[in-house]
Image: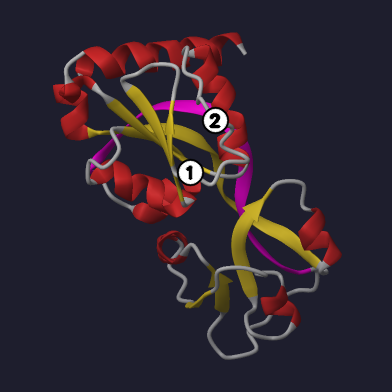
Amino acid sequence: MKPDASLTIALAKGRILDEALPVLAGAGIFPTQDPGTTRKLILATNLPHVRIIIVRATDVPTYVAYGAADLGIAGKDVLMEYNNNVVYEPLDLGIARCRMVLAGPKRTLQPVHGRLRVATKYVNTTRDYFAGQGRQVEIIRLYGSMELAPVLGLADYIVDLMDTGNTLKANGLVPLETIAEISSRVIVNKAAMKMKHDQIQPLLDKMALWKKGK
């Protein structure tokens, strides 16, 4: 097979990786090493022309957009935040489902700083959400332990992903509004889709069949 027919697939460790491996298996692709235990970031597969790279979840769209990977699997939350139309999003796999929510204390919330403060790592998505409602808020970027922000008075609300809601409940918070239903999608580099269509399209078809049959 010609070198330009090779395919690089970007995945991120964690829940998406765990749920993406059966998708790839359904398409006949198996890593030759366990991604959960190896420290390698580039993994060969049973197909000599296909390799998997392990990157941060938030970096998957960047690797695909710039052509370092031909395709990847990313959560819709990351794609909304990336806010870039330079990749195709041909298939919703329906895996790693959760919700992006606005959450806060159970009490009726009044801003403690004049303008509402919202803590989140989804800065662009949060800004767009409130702008669409004609509401002005101050956004504080945080990368973890989001639930602490309202408890300690850093922010009035948070915007974060919610699966079971147990973490919110344990910290005295409740989901107030659903911003988006989240699942993981296949994304494809636009140039690769043209240049490697004969390799990528059959893979997409097999993934779609996997979704239909799961």
Left or right of 142? Residue 50 is: left
Q: Is residue 168 positioned above or below 191 on the image? A: below
Q: Position of residue 31 (x, y in %)?
A: 50, 26
Tell me the CA gap for discs 2 and 1: 9 Å
| Residue pictured at 67% horizontal, 70% vertical | 145
The residues colored magenta run 86-105
Question: Which image quadrant: the C terminus?
Answer: top right
Q: Nearer the viewer, residue 54 or 59?
A: 54
Residue 93 within the segment the image draws in magenta: yes
For the residue carrying disc 2, how many other residues have a C-alpha within 10 Å: few (<14), some (14-19), or many (20+)?
some
Q: SS at mark 2? A: loop
Structure colour scheme: secondary structure
Q: Position of residue 33 (x, y in %)?
A: 54, 30
Left or right of 194? Residue 169 is: right
Q: Are marks 2 and 1 in contact (CB under 8 Å)?
A: yes
Magenta residues, dominant SS class: strand
Residue 92 within the segment the image draws in magenta: yes
Instruction: Return the mark for residue 40.
Output: 1
| Residue pictured at 75% horizontal, 79% vertical | 151
Residue extending furthest toward the bottom: 113
For the residue carrying disc 1, how many other residues have a C-alpha within 10 Å: few (<14), some (14-19), or many (20+)?
few
| Residue pictured at 27% horizontal, 39% vertical | 87
Q: Nearer the viewer, residue 39 or 76?
A: 39
Q: Position of residue 60 (x, y in %)?
A: 39, 46
Q: Amino acid at mark 1?
A: Lys
Q: Is residue 2 positioned above or below 158 on the image? A: above
Q: Is residue 181 positioned above or below 112 on the image? A: above
Q: Position of residue 197 (x, y in %)?
A: 21, 17
| Residue pictured at 69% horizontal, 86% vertical | 153
Instruction: Return the mark for residue 33.
Output: 2
Instruction: Return the mark for residue 135.
Output: none
